[in-house]
Amino acid sequence: MKARGAVLSRRSAHSAAVSDWRTLQAGERVEIIKQAHVVATGEVEEVSQSGNVLWLVPAGPSEKELFLKSDGVQVRRG
């Protein structure tokens, strides 16, 4: 039986915001959060070398989107 603390820690880590966008991989599913609201979900297409720009292929039928860290958005692995 797994320790309860280990399970909760993994859940917290999974839902925590990614501070260094450069750690994200192409194809990874993420949520984009702005002001505590999920504004987009989809797969990472690319992250800039600086880690300040992310291109997202949305889950729905729409064009890929560009997100800037300077706009105050957060990324959470989904």
Image (cartoon, rainbow, N blue to C red):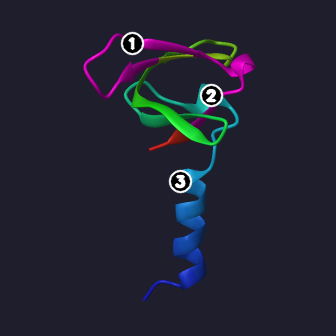
Contact check, label 2 and label 1, Cβ < 8 Å: no
Q: Where the N terminus falls, by quadrant? A: bottom left
At 70% from the left and 36% from the top, the residue drawn is 19
Secondary structure beneath label 1: loop
Q: State which tag comes first along the sequence, 2 or 1.
A: 2
Instruction: Tell me if mark 2 has few (under 14), some (14-19) or many (20+) residues whose alpha carbon lies within 10 angstroms of its own.
Output: many
Residue drawn at (57%, 75%) of the image: 6
Residue 71 in the magenta stretch? The answer is yes
Residue 57 in the magenta stretch? The answer is yes
CA–CA distance in space, label 3 to label 1: 24 Å
Q: In the image, residue 23 lies at what x, y percent?
A: 59, 32
Q: Secondary structure at mark 3?
A: helix
Q: Is residue 43 left or right of residue 73?
A: left
Disc 2 to disc 3, C-alpha distance: 14 Å
Residue 52 relative to residue 43: left or right: right
Q: Is residue 36 above or below residue 11?
A: above
Residue, disc 2: 21
Q: Is label 2 or label 1 in front? A: 1
Given the image, on which type of amino acid does mark 1 rest?
Lys
Measured from the top left, where is residue 24 in percent x and y? 53, 31
* Residue drawn at the location 51% of the way across and 73% of the way down: 7
Residue range corresponding to the magenta coloring: 56-75
Report the disc number at residue 64. Answer: 1
Of pointers 2 and 3, the one earlier in the residue sequence = 3
What residue is shown with label 3? 14
Horizontally, residue 23 falls left or right of residue 50, namely left
